[in-house]
């Protein structure tokens, strides 16, 4: 076979078609069904064992703790709606513990009847509670999941109450700090106002009042404006100092060390952000100072305000990273204090930056005003001081009243919109959210099928044996026909030759299968004028000898002269197969000793005179030397003149290399494959060696097929109907044979390839060398006793007795004919 012929076969061995895939799944359908049932059973058991969980949800509206919490926001009317900090507090340990205190835990029990007063029974409430927020709103949903639906409902509502109380206490604390700070600033402001008024009055009394110029008034107003802007900032900076001291002490008591304000300002990123903030703030203040000329809705003013807001946020984020990292503590209250400290740092830094900008601009106007007459400037300064302190005093009084009212009115920052309820069906029974039975069953259904398919493919990958004809055709190739298949059989051991089906039961279904194979071989060889062939198999015990004997018997029963040669000189089987007593002489004696073939040929069946066998004879040390000799070739030429067909039973290649020596003298080789036993690798190796030697492969026999395991590959199992039909029962009787003798029924076929293989091996070992039938020598029996003795004497005088030794080479050297060839 050339390379071009091998390429398609190699390509056929790669990949898998859809048809082959479905065939594999069909053959291993029981594994798929078993896997599917196991997965579904596991799902059902899980659903029966798992504890159902119930869910209860409450929707609340949360107000930010930062609304009106800083002095700057109160002064300028700015508010914020971010509630990320508040959401974190909802799951704090303090909130959970207070919520549990509000419930009577002894009223709740789990599915086993245990009270919820035991911590291990109710479990971790933090793991059972989830908080979600609605985007861009202050709406928060708190979900509680538990095995007791009523506990989930009551705990969710109690959690809202404790959450409201916690946020309320934090808000009241903040308002109290603001109120105390404003009250502390009022006396200072009043004293400053009195001092400024006294100074103005004394100046007017001691100096001559003159009318100030318009420019002086304008400069004085601007300076007063900047001073007025600066005073609230001074108060805000002092407020920040108070907050810094408060939260620093809180963290210090908790054992948390945070960086100081000076350390934070020394950070490179903070310094850079503050520098950029000062530049934009200065430009914005200048625009505000000339607001009569520039509209507040100017694009540049909007850009500056937006930039300042972004830089303020970036500054807060950076300071938060430095002061209050996420992993600072597991306590939400401590984390909140650290975050508030970071906001106080940011407030002080921004306030100082704004003050420095105002001072800088004010210094510019002051230097210009300094050029005016000192008297004029002094008067304007005094009036400006009085105006600033009066305005500040009025605003402080208003703020004090606002903070008092806010402090008194605080009840909480949480409003329940939809309280938690128990979800129930129409009959009032609570509806569990877990497990989702339909979803789990659907997943188990898909998973069972998928795992079953994967298991089938995995078993197919692990299975190195050949179990169906599709795999056999794929490996053998399209140019090597399947001569036929044989069912797996067991036989009646009471028969003389139990496995010779074509002789014992010639009209049975099994015999017909052998006859079909024999006819396929006969027709194929006649067209090519091929009369000598051998039958081999990749391994031992694969039904090679049994198949060869039945094929030979089938051809002989058709009237053809058939010689069956036992070419397995290492482990001969033919005589044991035909239940013959072992012969003393055979093939080896004919080749080595020059014995006549007529003396050693045996007729195994008395009523089949055209079937003869040639036993192996004495066991040689080197079997391949027998088949490579000229005497063997001459013997075959002689036998071809006597028989229509010569069949050679050969040893498997994996155990005996002489197969290749035998193959040189045959017209073709038939390969016997036993289903479920022969391996793919062994068949490939055998075919490769035969192709390499250029041996003609007549075809392949698929032997030992279990019909029920073929997945209906053979026409959907129609041969079952053929064998079980009324015609088959009447005509193909298992009790009928050519001798009109009743035979025992065939034994029951076991449904496992491996068990049948081991069973056959055991029977073969028991039957070896235990023949009960005496062999007959048909050619010698046709001669008279005197002629038989003359033949023996002639062969004895003209032949040489074989001499064997343990060394095969030494045996060849001691052979006279081998020495004669050497001399030639």
Image (spheres, rainbow, N blue to C red):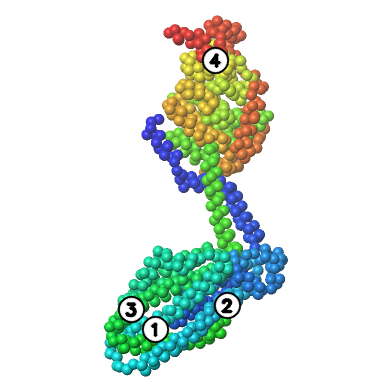
Q: How many C-alpha atoms fall within 10 Å of the one at disc 3: few (<14), some, or many (≥20)?
A: some
Q: CA distance from mark 1 to mark 4?
A: 123 Å
Q: Nearer the viewer, residue 766 or 613?
A: 766
Query: Could you tell me which residue is drawn at 53 percent across and 79 percent down?
Result: 177
**Residue placed furthest toward the front:** 206
Q: Which residue is mark 2?
A: 169
Q: Which residue is mark 3?
A: 363
Q: CA distance from mark 2 to mark 3?
A: 45 Å
Q: How many C-alpha atoms fall within 10 Å of the one at disc 2: few (<14), some, or many (≥20)?
A: some
Q: Nearer the viewer, mark 1 or mark 4?
A: 1
Q: Nearer the viewer, residue 153 or 140?
A: 140
Name the quadrant containing residue 607: top right
- Residue 288, numbered circle: none
Whether tag 2 and tag 4 are in contact, CB under 8 A, the answer is: no
State the SS at label 1. Answer: helix
- Residue 807, numbered circle: 4
State the SS at label 4. Answer: loop
In the rendered image, the vertical position of residue 601 relative to residue 716, given as above or below: above
Whether tag 3 and tag 1 are in contact, CB under 8 A, the answer is: no
């Amino acid at each position: 076979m050339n390379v071009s012929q091998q390429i398609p076969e190699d390509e056929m061995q790669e990949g898998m078609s859809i048809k082959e895939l479905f065939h594999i799944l069909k053959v291993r359908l029981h594994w798929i069904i078993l896997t599917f049932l196991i997965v579904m059973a596991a799902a059902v058991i899980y659903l029966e064992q798992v504890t159902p969980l119930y869910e209860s949800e409450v929707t609340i509206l949360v107000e930010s703790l930062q609304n009106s919490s800083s002095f700057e926001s109160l002064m300028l009317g700015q508010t914020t709606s971010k509630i990320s900090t508040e959401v974190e507090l909802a799951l704090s340990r303090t909130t959970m513990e207070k919520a549990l205190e509000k419930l009577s835990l002894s009223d709740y029990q789990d599915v086993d009847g245990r009270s919820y007063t035991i911590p291990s029974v109710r479990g971790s409430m933090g793991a059972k509670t989830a908080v979600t927020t609605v985007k861009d709103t202050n709406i928060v949903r708190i979900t509680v999941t538990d095995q007791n639906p009523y506990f989930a409902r009551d705990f969710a509502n109690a959690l809202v109450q404790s959450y409201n109380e916690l946020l309320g206490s934090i808000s009241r604390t903040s308002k109290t700090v603001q109120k105390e700070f404003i009250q502390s600033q009022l006396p200072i402001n009043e004293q400053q106002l009195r001092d400024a008024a006294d100074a103005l009055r004394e100046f007017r009394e001691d100096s001559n009042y003159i009318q100030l110029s318009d420019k002086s008034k304008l400069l004085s107003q601007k300076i007063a404006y900047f001073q007025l802007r600066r005073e609230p900032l001074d108060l805000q900076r002092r407020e920040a100092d108070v907050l810094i001291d408060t939260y620093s002490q809180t963290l210090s008591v908790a054992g948390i060390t945070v960086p100081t304000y000076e350390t934070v300002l020394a950070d490179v990123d903070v310094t850079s952000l503050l520098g950029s903030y000062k530049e934009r703030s200065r430009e914005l203040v200048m625009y505000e100072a000339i607001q009569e000329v520039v509209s507040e809705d100017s694009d540049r003013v909007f850009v500056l305000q937006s930039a300042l807001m972004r830089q303020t946020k970036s500054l807060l984020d950076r300071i938060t990273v430095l002061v209050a990292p996420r992993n600072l503590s597991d306590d939400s209250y401590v984390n909140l204090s650290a975050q508030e400290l970071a906001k106080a740092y940011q407030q002080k830094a921004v306030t100082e930056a704004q003050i420095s900008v105002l001072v800088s601009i004010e210094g510019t106007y002051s230097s210009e005003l300094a050029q005016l007459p000192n008297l004029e400037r002094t008067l304007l300064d005094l009036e400006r001081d009085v105006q600033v302190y009066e305005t500040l005093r009025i605003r402080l009084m208003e703020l004090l009243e606002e903070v008092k009212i806010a402090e008194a009115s605080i009840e909480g920052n949480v409003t329940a919109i939809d309280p938690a309820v128990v979800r129930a069906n129409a009959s009032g029974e609570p509806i569990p959210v877990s497990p989702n039975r339909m979803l789990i069953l659907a997943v188990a259904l898909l998973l069972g099928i998928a795992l079953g398919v994967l298991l089938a493919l995995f078993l197919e990958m692990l299975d190195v044996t050949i179990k169906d004809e599709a795999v056999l055709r794929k490996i053998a190739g399209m140019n090597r026909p399947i001569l036929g298949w044989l069912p797996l059989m067991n036989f009646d051991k009471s028969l003389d030759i139990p496995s010779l089906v074509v002789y014992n039961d010639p009209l049975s279904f099994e015999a017909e299968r052998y006859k079909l194979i024999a006819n396929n071989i006969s027709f194929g060889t006649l067209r090519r004028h091929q009369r000598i062939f051998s039958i081999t198999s990749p391994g031992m015990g694969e039904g090679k000898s049994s198949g060869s004997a039945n094929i030979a018997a089938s051809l002989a029963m058709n009237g053809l002269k058939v010689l069956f040669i036992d070419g397995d000189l290492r482990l001969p089987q033919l005589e044991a197969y035909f239940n013959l007593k072992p012969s003393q002489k055979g093939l080896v004696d004919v080749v080595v000793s020059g014995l006549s073939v007529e003396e050693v040929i045996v007729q195994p069946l008395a009523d089949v005179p055209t079937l003869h066998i040639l036993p192996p004879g004495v066991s040689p040390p080197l079997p391949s030397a027998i088949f490579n000799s000229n005497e063997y070739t001459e013997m075959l030429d002689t036998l071809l003149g006597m028989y229509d067909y010569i069949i050679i039973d050969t040893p498997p290649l994996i155990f005996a290399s002489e197969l290749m020596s035998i193959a040189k003298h045959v017209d073709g080789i038939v390969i016997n494959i036993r289903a479920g036993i022969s391996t793919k690798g062994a068949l490939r190796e055998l075919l490769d060696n035969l192709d390499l030697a250029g041996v003609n492969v007549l075809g392949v026999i698929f032997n030992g097929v279990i019909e029920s395991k073929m997945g209906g590959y053979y026409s959907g199992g129609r041969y079952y109907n053929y064998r079980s039909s009324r015609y088959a029962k009447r005509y193909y009787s298992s009790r009928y044979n050519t001798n009109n003798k009743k035979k025992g029924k065939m034994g029951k076929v076991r449904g496992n390839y491996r068990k049948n293989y081991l069973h056959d091996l055991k029977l073969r070992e028991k039957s070896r060398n235990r023949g009960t039938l005496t062999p007959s020598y048909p050619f010698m029996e046709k001669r008279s006793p005197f002629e038989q003795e003359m033949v023996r004497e002639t062969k004895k005088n003209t032949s040489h007795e074989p001499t064997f030794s343990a060394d095969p080479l030494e045996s060849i050297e001691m052979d006279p004919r081998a020495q004669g060839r050497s001399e030639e």
